[in-house]
Amino acid sequence: SLVSASCPALLPRLSPGLAIYPDFISEAEEAALCGELEPGLRRKRYESGHWDQAIHGFRETERLQWSPENASVLQRVRDTAFPPGEAQLSLVHVLDLQKEGYIKPHVDSVKFCGTTIAGICLLSSSIMRLVSVDKPEERVDLLLPRRCLYVLGGPVRYDFTHEILRDEESVFNGQRVPRERRISVICRNLPES
Ligand code: AKG
């Protein structure tokens, strides 16, 4: 399983809206996405961030226009993650974490993001940790394998923080999951009204 919970009773509560699709994209599709993203990313510097920032060791961009090949991968993401006709952000968020980079626990702003976050993971596997906002002992680790799609919707979206662990902490069920540089390509739906 790609899900490891601090208590089994958590799982049924989380399953509506939470999904991981291993091998959602092929190696060739991963290479094509990176190929289109690299030139723009390379022009930016990794930001180390202030102590209060959610993300460390990252650079990011947003993208509207894609090659036909990459556009069809993103369409597959949208078709998998969102119901037909759902209002979505057309801009795709691209987050490039350096090997030393990580994302601290946070809940995405309800002002800018709707019910669902859908991301594909390029270049590295990682651990996404979910921690209940009300009961921090309720904790779930997700193993996000390289080239997977993950979908965070339903209760996890609002009731749990999510974070991407740094390399030193990247352990799943006792197994090290080395964190390399990682690029996530994230689609979101729009908040209601
Ligand atoms: C977010 O979009 O809120 C994230 O935390 C991004 C997670 C990721 O890089 O997959």
Image (tube, rainbow, N blue to C red):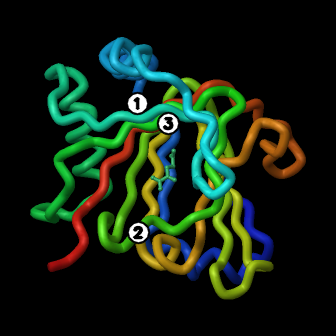
- Residue bearing the label numbered 2: 109
Q: Earlier in the sequence, mark 3 or mark 2?
A: 2
Does any portion of residue 146 appear in the rendered image?
A: no
Which residue corresponds to the image point at 59% horizontal and 69% vertical from the top-left? 161
- Residue bearing the label numbered 1: 25
Label 3 – label 2 distance at C-alpha: 21 Å
Judged from the image, the secondary structure of the residue bearing numbered disc 1 is loop
Identify the disc placed on residue 108.
none
Quarter assignment of residue 87: bottom left
Look at the numbered discs 1 and 2 and tell me whether their residues touch, using CB distance below 8 Å.
no
Note whether ligand 1 is within 8 Å of mark 3: yes
Query: Does residue 63 appear to the left or right of 8 in the view shown?
Result: left
Query: Does residue 38 appear to the left or right of 169 in the view shown?
Result: left
Front of the two marks 1 and 2: 2
Which residue corresponds to the image point at 47% horizontal and 46% vertical from the top-left? 21
> Picture coordinates of residue 37 (x, y %)?
35, 21
Does any portion of residue 192 appear in the rendered image?
A: yes
Judged from the image, the secondary structure of the residue bearing numbered disc 2 is loop
Front of the two marks 3 and 1: 3
Which residue corresponds to the image point at 19% horizontal and 26% vertical from the top-left? 66
Label 3 – label 1 distance at C-alpha: 9 Å
Q: Amino acid at mark 3?
A: Cys
Quadrant of the rendering where the C terminus is positioned: bottom left
Q: Earlier in the sequence, mark 1 or mark 2?
A: 1
Note whether ligand 1 is within 8 Å of mark 1: no
Residue at far left of view: 85
Label 1 – label 2 distance at C-alpha: 28 Å
Instruction: Answer above or below: position of 79 versus 11.
Output: above
Identify the disc placed on residue 121.
3
Q: Amino acid at mark 1?
A: Ile
Judged from the image, the secondary structure of the residue bearing numbered disc 3 is strand
